[in-house]
Image (tube, helix red, strand yellow):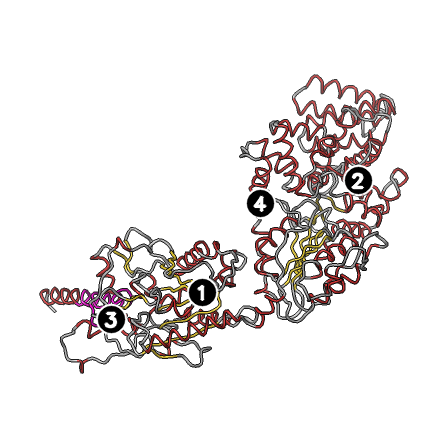
Amino acid sequence: MDVNEGISWAVWTTVLCLVCATAAWLWFYAPAGSGTAPSSPAKPASDSTRSTQRGVHLSQVNEDNGDTDIDIIAIHGLDAKSPDTWTWRDQRNPNGVNWLAEPELLPKEVGKARIFTCDWPADLLQPSDLVPKHDGEIVTLLIDGINRELLAKNKTRDRPILFIASCLGGIILMRALTTAADHECATSCYCLRKATRGIIFLATPFRGTSFQEVAHWADPGLTAWALIRDRKVSKLLDSVKGSTFDLEALVRKFTRVCQHPNRPFLVFNFYELGMTSLWRKIFPWLPTLFFKGKPLVGRSSATLDIVLEPLPLDRTHGLMNKFGSRNCEDYKKVAWKIKEFIGKIREGTPLAQADACYRVKFSLQGMPTSNNFVPRPSDITDIEKSLLPSHQKEQGCNVFVLHGLGGIGKTQLAVNFARQYQAAFSAIFWLDGTSEDSLKQSFASCAKRIPKDQIPENIRSPKTGNEVDLNDIVEHVQEWLAKDGNVDWLLIFDNVDLDYTQGEIPGAYDIRKYYLRSDHGAVLITSRLSKLAQLGESKRIKPADLDLSKKIFEKWYRKELMMDDDAKELLDSKLGGLPLALAQAAAYIGEADIPIAKYIDLYEKQWDKLLQNTDSDLLDYGNRSVWTTWMISFNAIETKDKNAGNLLRLWAFLDNREMWHSLLQAAKNDQEQWPKWLCDIACNEVKFLNIATLLLRYSMIETRESEQSSYSMHPVVHRWISHIQNDAGKRVFLRLAVMLIGFSVPYRTTKNYWVLQRRLLPHAERCLWWIGKLEGGECNIEDITIVHATHSLGDLYLDQGRLQEAETMYQRALEGREKALGPDHTSTLDTVNNLGLLYSDQGRLKEAETMYQRALEGKEKALGPDHTSTL
């Protein structure tokens, strides 16, 4: 091929691409967007009229008197817009007939239903300055748009919806509904999924279109055409080519979604019989016999396997969503199917009918509601996935347990779930689980809300003076919950904190006997008892992170919190992300109008007075405060095992971040100087683990993820335990804490001694803090055991390079040993020598020399000049 031939070939190739582009444009645009009969020319849409490039918009097209019951939403296909895509135009109707809006057409057929058109970003050629949207982004826009413009405005967010989906609009709708089924934890997804009751598909290409036959040459042409117009070809075009693995997977998934046993919806398909020929669009002057047309979306592609008898419409693809009069046979077919679906939706499924029969009006009665609640999406997601009716298992009652520390926010999460998803359940009953008597009283309150004639009236609403046994009321409510058709209720048992397995605890009960009679329904339990997690699915609620802590604090503080060092210290280090503590602190700071730094100072110096103040109790938390919220659990623990209570008291004077069995090992030696309870725990790891299990059961401690058989305690709980003790008790347990840490310090000759020293250091610092607080910074120099332990703490600080703290410990030990043992005792001289080492490290050489001289002279006198200690 010579150069001229090459240029000629390139020119003809370019021309052919442009021709193909024009043809493809006409094919896709004219049928879907023109809204014309075959004899009418295509009417291109100007960019200025395109309102759908960036979002989704719903427009109501029929009038209603306010008494409506169903919403019909019509979704157009590729490169179309409303109302054109739904409008028939011909010589008799030059202004067009929109069958969705014309009063004598669909509005007359559907009665009280509202009819909407839904515009979405469906342009085939999109502006070049925008990133082309992919299916996932458009699906998100569709879900959000329908929820925002329709569902959120409805009185009931599950108001029935019947969709009419044209061509590619059906594919986008399928993706939206399968996405909603996967993400029902999102309110918008849940509402869309539950509201959908039926879909009429008009020539939707479930297995692609015949465009796949020419795609290999039409694609370059469209691209060239788009470049000429400074546009980009939409990625949506890929969805109308041949069947792909992704499209097949979508169809299978959608089939499962629409056949869900609890939330099925109606589906029907219409397919085209009219023939379309792309070649004839390019060369209209050639005889028809040269071109063989075929349906763009034939029966095999436009029909789902679950629709056994789809109906054909005798028209081409571009007219599948346009009807000009009531006499049109194709209109009659579509209108009849829509009317049939509307009737079935109004009648409801057997499950929906039962749901309506047993529906109980939602009430906040008994719920400790709060206007200060801050959403915690990561915590509520698991509840939604487990308890929402569309996710429930086909048999058995669905149980979910929220467990964790008191004040961590379990109750408020349960309240928020109930309020957010009230429409999802036929009845929601809030039950006070603090004791068995309070639980039965709650059942009696629930009985009053059950519809008439479904339980005996003397049980539902006993007359004044007629005593009714609470057990009879509970029995009848449980029978009502167990009825076959009554399957979508939710029981919330709040504050089930008494462990009936731990002996005769007043008010304790087995919660299972109050719901296990039903083989359906949902149960949400809030408890501090981690063992209740065995009842079903569960989630341990953890403290809030810094970002969530800030939001909770600001809700109660009523203004923005500046996140300086003081604020971070308060939220994280002091309050540890505990919602109850955050709320109480924010309310106090706001009312007292004091700076954060001042509150921290009060927190350190007057913790008990600050948090025991009943004026700081919070209405949203049932008038509980940090001071009162854990007392029930602590008393139950002590009743079960006195040693567990003692270990908590001891831990209050150690660091809260880590406790392990070997930390108690010092109590195995010289057992006469240790209390028996501590020796028993130190000498028996099984006893220690049993105590840890008991404390975990009541959520008083947590397992450390980084260390096996190691535990931590929330900083506010840790502080609380120390302050429920009187001063005499504090001194007893502080003494034990100092002894434990001091006598656990390893010698430098011990292998890897520095590893244990680093673990002991935080505990030593806590002991030092308490010594300063309780003893005014002075050590009890008359207690020689404490004096020896204090010396060891000095060794620990010295080895860790904490010279200031080491000097303080050595000075206290020296004073104690001089008084108890005398200035020349070898133990006293050991402390003197270590002070010399410390002063030397600090560069205080004269003071170091003095200490060394004293130690040398003392040991020569006591042991002789040739003793190894002297040398």
The amino acid sitting under disc 3 is Ala
Residue at the extreme left of the image, as rendered: 4
Res. 746 visible in picture: no
User: Foreground residue, 777 or 863?
Assistant: 777
Q: CA distance from mark 4 to mark 2?
A: 33 Å
The amino acid sitting under disc 1 is Lys
Q: Quadrant of residue 104?
A: bottom left
Q: CA distance from mark 3 to mark 1?
A: 30 Å
Q: Quadrant of residue 796?
A: top right
Q: Considering the numbered disc 4 on the image, is that residue within a helix, a strand or a loop?
A: loop
Q: Considering the numbered disc 2 on the image, is that residue within a helix, a strand or a loop?
A: helix
Return the residue at label 4: 374
CB atoms of marks 4 and 3 within 8 Å: no
Q: Considering the numbered disc 3 on the image, is that residue within a helix, a strand or a loop?
A: loop
The amino acid sitting under disc 4 is Val
User: Quick one: label 3 or label 2, which is nearer the N terminus?
Assistant: 3
The amino acid sitting under disc 2 is Arg
Return the residue at label 2: 649
For the magenta stretch, what is the residue range? 16-40
Q: Quadrant of residue 50?
A: bottom left
Q: Residue 90 magenta-drawn? A: no
Return the residue at label 1: 112
Return the residue at label 3: 37
Residue sitting at 86 percent across and 54 percent down?
504
Measured along the vertical axis of the image, is residue 332 above or below residue 816? below
Closer mark to the observer between disc 2 and disc 1: 1
User: Quick one: label 4 or label 3, which is nearer the N terminus?
Assistant: 3
Residue 723 image point, x, y percent: 77, 35
Q: Quadrant of the N terminus?
A: bottom left
CB atoms of marks 2 and 1 within 8 Å: no
Residue at the extreme bottom of the image, as rendered: 289
